[in-house]
Amino acid sequence: MSLAEVRWIDIPHSDDDRGTLTVIEESALPFPLKRIFYMHRVPDALERGGHAHRWTQQLAVAASGRFAMDLFDGERSATYVLEDPNRGLYLPAMMWMRLYGFAAGTVALVVCDRTYDAGAVIRDRDTYCRLRRDDGLDDLS
């Protein structure tokens, strides 16, 4: 649950005269696959994210286009640029994220180890920082 756990994961793919076929299978992930979603048609200069998932691990991929992601673990922050559809960024649980800089036509694909639970999403950065500082991950009030 820190930036030290964030890492790039190469996604198996094959290239031939017809193009590239990229396949995400559970065996290539560091978690069981339970949910897939994607963001697209993000209006210019708008952001996504601005939250953290208490328990959900994710793999983010720029299936098409390019976007940036700022990650914060309560102490350190780092910026990643996603632009290779054959490589995803692994995000452990409790990672504050901000997605921005979406190029026109970008499709951001996210694979998760859990189904969506709105009650387990921390949307206030001050609350997130308090929880990280206190390790009170069971208390969201």
Image (tube, rainbow, N blue to C red):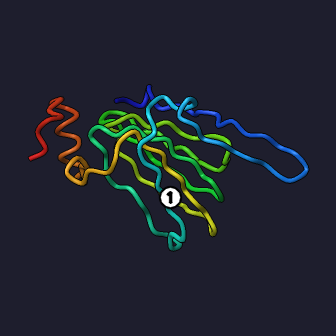
Q: Image point 26% across, 40% down: which residue?
A: 54
Q: Residue furthest right?
A: 17
**In the image, residue 43 above or below residue 95:** below
The residue nearer to you, when weighing 54 against 132, is: 54
Q: How many marks?
A: 1
**In the image, residue 31 above or below residue 56:** above
Left or right relative to 19: residue 68: left
Label 1 crowd bin: few (<14), some (14–19), many (20+), radius 10 Å: few
Left or right relative to 18: residue 140: left
In the picture, the quarter occupied by the N terminus is top left
Q: Residue furthest left?
A: 141
**In the image, residue 85 above or below residue 78:** below
Left or right relative to 47: residue 52: left
Q: Image point 57% across, 48% down: which residue?
A: 61
Residue that mark 1 sits on:
38
Q: Secondary structure at mark 1?
A: strand
The residue nearer to you, when weighing 16 against 103, is: 16
Residue 23: % across, % down:
65, 42
Residue 3: % across, % down:
42, 31
Left or right relative to 68: residue 97: left
Residue 18: % across, % down:
86, 53
**In the image, residue 42 above or below residue 30:** below
Query: Label 1 is placed on what type of residue?
Result: Tyr
Residue 82: % across, % down:
59, 48
Q: Residue furthest top?
A: 4
